[in-house]
């Protein structure tokens, strides 16, 4: 019998694959697959992904990185992984160019601050004018948080509570530092909040692009949850 994480990964591949079915992201078939994926993600738990087993080899001590990444599955169409945030750690404010994202908290609590660009995204622009959304404080009892190629496309994620806060992240397509099959690169850019104004009762923020913050430190450990060998073999 397939594990929950294997079923989830298979559904993520089915939903976002661009190799076999180039379905529009607004088609009824995509929406059906996407909602099925959300249902699987909402039911996933820390034990379903072997979180403790994977973290058993992570570094310890005062100098360990604030963030640890656990890669579960990745191909050209979708990535599935876990981010672990230690107290006071955060994923700095960043973008997701031409990407969809799904976030599900597995342990602890995270605070998510999202922004939606008001203009078309220009990868060469050093300044973005965005709508600022209400801060979301999310734990494992809450449903997924979503972003798409525009709405809530930028966010900052901070450790909120617990000895650690961990969340499952699905990105489609993943980041790349080389031209993908669609001819695009999807680099991760970081931002800081500049001026903010209240317009028609809504907060509008000017986000200034910056270098990767020096305070952001991240390492990775091997995934040691239920095997995905059948998926890996079938996608090679």
Image: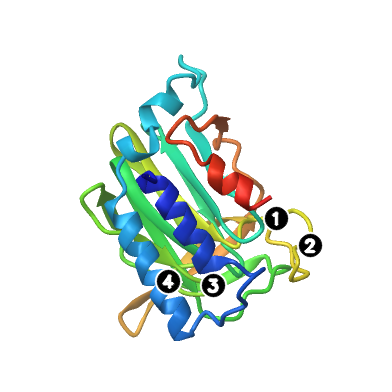
* Nearer mark to the viewer, of 4 and 1: 4
What is the CA distance from the residue labelled 3 to the residue labelled 1?
A: 15 Å
Graded by Cα atoms within 10 Å as few (under 14), some (14 to 19) or many (20 or more), the crowding at tag 1 reads: few
* Nearer mark to the viewer, of 4 and 3: 4
In terms of depth relative to the viewer, which is nearer, 124 or 21?
21
What is the CA distance from the residue labelled 2 to the residue labelled 4?
A: 27 Å
What is the CA distance from the residue labelled 4 to the residue labelled 1?
A: 24 Å
Graded by Cα atoms within 10 Å as few (under 14), some (14 to 19) or many (20 or more), the crowding at tag 3 reads: some
Disc 4 element = helix
* Residue bearing the label numbered 2: 179
- Label 2 or label 3, whichever comes before in sequence order: 3
What is the CA distance from the residue labelled 2 to the residue labelled 3?
A: 18 Å
* Residue bearing the label numbered 1: 176
* Nearer mark to the viewer, of 2 and 3: 2
| Residue 53 numbered tag | none
* Residue bearing the label numbered 3: 149
* Residue bearing the label numbered 4: 33
| Residue 120 position within the rendered picture, expressed as x and y whole percent measured from the top left | 61, 80
Disc 3 element = loop
Residue 87, compared with residue 61, is above or below; it is below
Residue positioned 39% across, 63% down in the render: 37
Residue 121, compared with residue 193, is above or below; it is below
> Answer yes or no: do the residues labelled 2 and 1 have beta carbons within 8 Å?
yes
Q: Quadrant of the N terminus?
A: top left
> Answer yes or no: do the residues labelled 2 and 3 have beta carbons within 8 Å?
no
What is the CA distance from the residue labelled 2 to the residue labelled 1?
A: 7 Å
| Residue 227 position within the rendered picture, expressed as x and y whole percent measured from the top left | 48, 36
Disc 2 element = loop
In terms of depth relative to the viewer, which is nearer, 178 or 134?
178
């Amino acid at each position: 019998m397939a594990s929950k994480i294997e079923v989830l990964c298979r559904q993520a591949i089915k939903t976002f694959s661009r190799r076999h079915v180039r379905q529009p992201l607004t088609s009824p078939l995509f929406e059906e697959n996407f909602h099925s994926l959300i249902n699987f993600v909402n039911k996933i738990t820390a034990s379903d992904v072997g979180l403790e087993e994977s973290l058993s080899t992570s570094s310890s001590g005062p100098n360990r990185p604030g963030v640890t990444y656990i890669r579960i599955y990745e191909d050209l169409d979708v990535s599935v992984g876990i981010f672990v945030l230690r107290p006071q750690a955060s994923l700095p404010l960043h973008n997701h160019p031409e990407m969809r994202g799904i976030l599900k908290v597995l342990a602890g609590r995270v605070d998510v601050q999202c922004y939606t660009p008001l203009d078309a995204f220009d990868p060469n622009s050093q300044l973005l004018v965005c709508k600022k959304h209400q801060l979301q404080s999310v734990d494992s009892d809450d449903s997924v948080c979503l972003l798409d190629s525009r709405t809530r496309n930028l966010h900052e994620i901070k450790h909120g509570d617990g000895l650690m806060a961990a969340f499952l992240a699905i990105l489609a397509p993943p980041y790349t530092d080389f031209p993908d099959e669609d001819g695009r690169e999807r680099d991760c850019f970081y931002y800081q909040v500049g001026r903010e104004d209240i317009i028609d009762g809504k907060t509008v923020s000017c986000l200034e692009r910056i270098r990767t913050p020096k305070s952001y430190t991240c390492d990775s450990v091997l995934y040691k949850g239920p095997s995905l060998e059948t998926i890996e073999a079938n996608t090679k």
